[in-house]
Amino acid sequence: MKFQSLLRPLAVVAGMATVATLAACSPADSAPAPSDGAPTRVTIQIDGAAVPYYAPLYQAVEQGYFEDEGLEVEFTYAEASSVLQNVAAGNVEFGFPNGDSVITAKSKGVDVEVVHTTYQQGIGAVLFNEETNPITSAADLKGKKIAVTDLGSPNYIQLQAMLADADLTVSDVEIVTVGSGAIVAALQGGEVDAIAFSRLRYFALESAGFPVGQMLSDEFLPSFGNVLVTSPSFREKSPEAVAGFVAALDKGIQYVIDNTDEATATVIKKYADTFAGQEEQISKVLTDVFVADLWQSEGTKENGFGYGDLKRWQSAIDAQVSFGLIDEAFDAESLVVEPGDL
C-alpha cells in the first residue's frame, strides 16, 4: 500500500464569489444562437466557490481560448447537487461538480453526461495527527474516532473502502459527523483521531504547524474530483459549443501547466482575491497535486486531457452500489462521453 506525503504549505480559504441568480433563467433563455458572428453565450456553474484551483477555466477566458471557439462564458457557483439539477433543467449549459455527485445524480434520473473528466483522481483523504495517532496502514484505523461531514458523502464511502481493504467495517471504528466548517478544527483540537475529508486541507494544516499525515482515498477506491458536465439535449442542440468549450478548457490546462506562477497570480487577482498573499503556496500546490496527479494520468498521455477511463468510472459506480449510496448500477458508457467523440 502506498502513501503520499506532500509537504507544501497552503492556507486554504474558501472565498465566496458573487453568484449570479439563476431563478430567472430558463432553457429558452440560455445559449442563444449566434447571429452575424456574435459569440454563443454559455454559463458554467461550478461546485463551491471561486478558488485558484479552477485556474484552467479562468485562464481559458484570460488567454482568449473561449473567444477563439466563439464562446462568451459566464461563471456562477453552487453546491454540487444544485449544479447538476440546473444543468439537467437547461438553466445553465455546463457544470463543474465532483464526479461522485454526478454518479449519484445520474442514478436518480438527473439527465447529465460527463464530457471532460478534468480531475483524473479524487481528492479525498483521511487526515490524522502523526504524533498522537500515527497511521501507517488502513488496519491502524481500528478503534479510531473518525469524523465525516455526512454519512452520504463521497468521503464516507472512501473511508469504508479503506476499512474494507483491512477487512474492517464502520463497526470497527467510531464515526461522528461534523460539518465542513468545523471538521478540520475537530482534528486540530484532538476531538477526533482522524477526519475523512479533502487532501487539500493537508496543506493548510501543515502550514499551521500541525503534525498532519494523510492516506489518499484514491489508493483504495477510484473516484474523481471535478468534471465537466452538460445535458444530452444541449450537446445535441449545440455540439460545436460543447466541443469548443472542451477545446478551450484543454488549452487552459496546458497554459497553467506551462505558466503556473503567472497563471496563479492572475487568477487570484481577478477571480479569487481572498487568496491574496498565498500565491507562492498555491502555485506549489497546483504543481505538486493538480499538474502531477489530478489533471494528468497515463490515460491523458495517450488520449489527451479529460480522458474518461470507463473502467475506472464503472468501478466508482459499482462502489456506490456496494456501499448503499445508490440502488442500482448503470453502464458508465451512458454517463461518460469521450472528448474525442464530441
Image (cartoon, grey):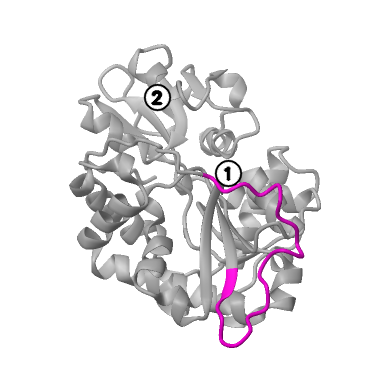
Residue positioned 25% across, 70% down in the render: 258
Q: Is residue 154 above or below residue 188?
A: below
Q: Is residue 107 above or below residue 200?
A: below
Amino acid under label 1?
Answer: Ala
Residue positioned 60% across, 28% down in the render: 150
Residue named by callout 2: 184
Residue lying farthest to the bottom in this orientation:
36
Expressed as whole percent of the image width and height from the top left, the position of residue 342 reads: 62, 80
Q: Of residues 277 and 30, which is closer to you in this image?
A: 30
Marker disc for residue 78: 1
Q: Is residue 234 left or right of residue 212?
A: right
Expressed as whole percent of the image width and height from the top left, the position of residue 60 reads: 40, 69
Magenta span includes 124: no
Expressed as whole percent of the image width and height from the top left, the position of residue 24 reads: 71, 50
Tell me, yes or no, whether the two marked residues, 1 and 2, touch with CB atoms within 8 Å: no
Q: Residues within 10 Å of mark 2 (few under 14, many from 20)?
A: many
Where, quadrant-wise, is the N terminus in this rendering?
Answer: top left
The part of the chain drawn in magenta is 19-41
Residue positioned 49% across, 44% down in the render: 18
Amino acid under label 2?
Answer: Val
Marker disc for residue 270: none
Magenta span includes 35: yes
Q: Of residues 331 and 181, which is closer to you in this image?
A: 181
Q: Is residue 21 above or below residue 171?
A: below
Q: Quadrant of residue 89?
A: bottom right
